Image (cartoon, helix red, strand yellow):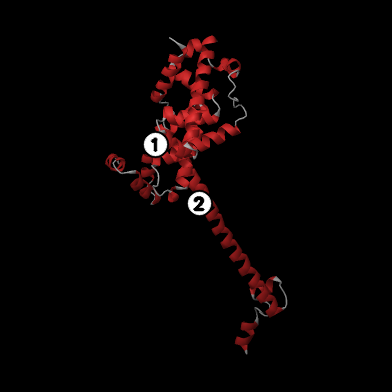
Amino acid sequence: MKESDKTENIIEEMANFNPEYQEGFSARVMGKIESMENQQQLPQFNRFISWISLSGAAAIILLLLMVYSTDGTLNMDAIYGLLNYSPDEPLLASLK
Amino acid sequence: MESELGELKSLNDLQLIDLSLKGNMRAFEVIIKRYESAVARVTISMLGNEAADDVGQEVFLRFYSSMKKFKGDSKLGTYLVRIAINLSLNEIKKNTRYSSGNNDNIENNHGSYNLEEEADTRSIIQYSLNLLEPEFRTVVVLRNIEGYSTRETAEILNIPQGTVLSRLSRGHQKLKEIITKLDVL
C-alpha cells in the first residue's frame, strides 16, 4: 500500500477512534465533587465556631470590666460577687 | 431508583442542569455519563491515557463550579469539549516531557512504542497524535476524531476558519511524515 493511502486510511480511521476512560469515571468525578463541597462547608463551620468563641471572649472581658468598675479589684471574691459578703451576717441578724 | 434514573436520562441538558443546580446530584451524574465519551476522546487524543483521566475529571469539576453561567448559547457537548481542549493545552504546556513536534522524536521515543507488539491502528493514531504539535493536534482531534465541521472547530478554538484549514492540512502532512518514519523503524 502506498504511504499516502496508508495515511489517508489512518486519518479516516480516526473517526472510529473511540478511547474510553477506565470504569467508574463518573463515580470518581462525583466523589471529587462531594469532597469539594465538604471543603467549601468547612470554612463556614470554622467561621461559625470563631464567631461563638469571640462572642464568649467579649462577654468575659465585659464582665471583668464591670466587676472592676464596681469593686475596684479583680480578685476571686469580687468575681464571685462575695467581696462584701460575711457568712456570719445572717446568723448575727437573726440573733438580734 | 432505577425509574428515577430512567426519567433523568430522558431529560434534555438544560433540564438536567436546572435539577443539578437545585442539588440533584443524580442529574449531574447523568450529564457526566452523557458526555464522558466525548471528553474522553478529546483528552485521551490530546494527552494519552495517563493524564487524560485527571484532566477529564477536572473538565466536569470546572463545569460543576460554573454551571450557573451556562445559558445554553452553545451545545453542552461543545462547551465541555472547549473546556477539555483548553485544559489539555494547559496540561501540555505544564508537561516538561512534551515532545516538540519534531519528528526526530520518533527515534527518541520508540522505546515507549513497540511496533511489533502494538501495531494496531489505535496505537498508531495515539502515538502519531502525541508527536504532533498541540496547535495541529487540536485541529486534527476536533475535525477528524470528534467530527466537528471547520466552522465549529473555528468557533471552539476561537480562530478563523482559514487557520483551521491550514492547520489541518499541515497536521495531515506531519502525520504522513510520522507514519512514514514509523515504518522505517
Query: Viewed as shown, does residue A74 lie left or right of A21?
Result: right
- The numbered dot on residue B110 is none
Q: Quarter-wise, where is residue B11 in the image?
A: top left
Tell me which residue sits at (53%, 51%) in the image.
A42
Number of marks: 2
Disc 2 target residue = A41
- Determine the chain carrying the residue at label 1: B
Residue at the front extreme of this rendering = B162
- Determine the chain carrying the residue at label 2: A
Label 1 and label 2: CA atoms lie apart by 28 Å
The percent coordinates of residue A16 (x first, y second) are 38, 24
Q: Give the foreground label among 1 and 2.
A: 1
- The numbered dot on residue B35 is 1
Q: Nearer the viewer, residue B92 or B149?
A: B149
Tell me which residue sits at (55%, 17%) in the image.
B112
Instruction: For mark 2, give the secondary structure.
Output: helix
